[in-house]
Amino acid sequence: MLSPLTPAEMAALLLSLKVAFWAVLCSLPFGVLLAWVLSRLEFPGKSLLDSLLHLPLVLPPVVIGYLLLVALGRNGLIGKILYEHLGVSIAFTWKGAVAASAVMAFPLLVRTVRLSFDAVDKRLEMAARTLGAGPWRVFFTITLPLSLPGIVAGMVLAFARSLGEFGATITFVSNIPGQTQTLPLALYTMTQVPNGEAAAMRLCCVAIVIALLAMIVANWLEKRFTRHVEG
């Protein structure tokens, strides 16, 4: 029988939940906006934008972490400005872990939300337009409510992906216990130390349970959304 989590393991779990929560919260407005743009607008370079958004899915996570370090590190293109003018340092902090998780989960969020927008009958939006509703009112009274289950499903998938992020996180913020050591990083650490098998198994079980719950919720929301649209 597995023993309870130690304080260090619990700290890694809580940090993972914190990072995943903020990653989804910070990326959600941009994800919804880009999903709507890709679903409703036609413009030159749309395929290129779509491809760029999905790059984190095909690039090695270490590459994403290195690019974040180049851009947001203390001497990076953007990070240097943030540090010199605002005193904000992102690399090697939990905020950096949020940035890495958000970037890696962003394609899943955008793709899921875009599919939910695509499923909304455009004739309903056109009917509202003919009745005098402006674009913002159409979006908030028709498009968004009908897409809400899909948006929530995208948030759940992005949350689960953020919880499991490893490569970009360890490259960008390192593996600092109590500061940047999330659940996957703690699991990796336990596999590298003598007699760490029990701790690794505990963390592995916790990760599996969280991932299963997230997938169950996402699948339930997807089925509910499908019935809602078809019915």
Image (cartoon, rainbow, N blue to C red):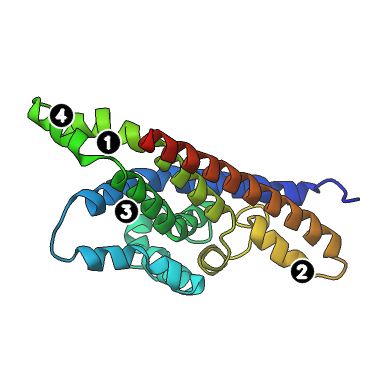
Mark 1 highlights which residue?
Answer: 143
Q: Alpha-carbon distance for marks 2 and 1?
A: 47 Å
Under mark 4, the amino acid is Ala
Q: Alpha-carbon distance for marks 3 and 1?
A: 40 Å
Residue 68 visible, this orientation: no
Mark 2 burial class by Cα count in 10 Å: few <14, some 14-19, many 20+: some
- Asked whether, in this view, residue 211 is left or right of residue 34, the answer is right
Q: Which mark is residue 191?
A: 2
Q: Alpha-carbon distance for marks 4 and 1?
A: 11 Å
Q: Residue at x 76, y 72 (%)?
A: 192
Q: Residue at x 40, y 58 (%)?
A: 107
Q: Quick check: marks 4 and 3 in contact, CB under 8 Å?
A: no
Q: x, y (%) of residue 29?
A: 33, 43
Residue 231 visible, this orientation: yes
Where does the C terminus fall, quadrant-wise? Answer: top left
Mark 3 burial class by Cα count in 10 Å: few <14, some 14-19, many 20+: few
Q: x, y (%) of residue 18?
A: 57, 44
Q: x, y (%) of residue 98?
A: 49, 52
Under mark 1, the amino acid is Thr
Under mark 2, the amino acid is Thr
